[in-house]
Image: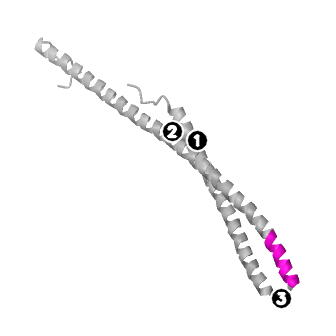
Amino acid sequence: MSRYRFPLETVRRLRAEQERASATELARAMTEASAADDAQRTLDELRRVGHEKLQEAGGDVARAQSVAVMLEQIGAHLDAASERSRTAWGAVQERYDAFVAALTDRKALDKLEERRREEWLLEHRRREQNALDDLSLQRRGRSEAGEAPDEDDPR
């Protein structure tokens, strides 16, 4: 009997490759989202420090005005960073969904391959058993008929 060969092996390999690619894309998206969060946290910290400086400025109007302008710019950058972070985490969710779909596809093919391999193995064993049974019946038939055993027969 020939060796086992899964007819959808090429498709299974392709699905596994798609799974690896989507995992890589997910990791990349998570790194980008994390970097966006870090930038947002840095800007938050700058804004906090700016507010402290504004409190320290007290009666120094020029200094207070300078800090207020800086805080306004930080606020604009913070809004942009927040949007980048939301967009990045949205991309993470999309990549995660794609990864889960690729994983599910690959696992389904793995299960199918496992079932087919088990079916092939059972069929292979059944055929071997049938061949042994046929051989046994042939030998028994010869001995009942009074025929001399073959010279090659190890009995």
Q: CA distance from mark 1 to mark 3?
A: 63 Å
- Residue stretch in magenta: 61-72
Q: Earlier in the sequence, mark 1 or mark 2?
A: 1
Q: CA distance from mark 2 to mark 3?
A: 67 Å
Q: Earlier in the sequence, mark 2 or mark 3?
A: 3
Left or right of residue 103: residue 3: left
| Quadrant in the rendering for residue 83 | bottom right
The answer to if 68 sits in the magenta stretch is yes
Instruction: Name the amino acid type tagged 1.
Output: Gln
The residue under label 2 is 105
Nearer to us of marks 2 and 3 is: 3
Q: CA distance from mark 1 to mark 2?
A: 10 Å
Kindly identify the residue that appears in the image at 41 percent across and 26 percent down: 2
Nearer to us of marks 1 and 2 is: 2
| Quadrant in the rendering for residue 128 | top left
Instruction: Name the amino acid type tagged 2.
Output: Asp
Estimate the x, y position of residue 117 in percent, counting from the top left: 39, 33
Residue 18: numbered disc: 1
The residue under label 3 is 59
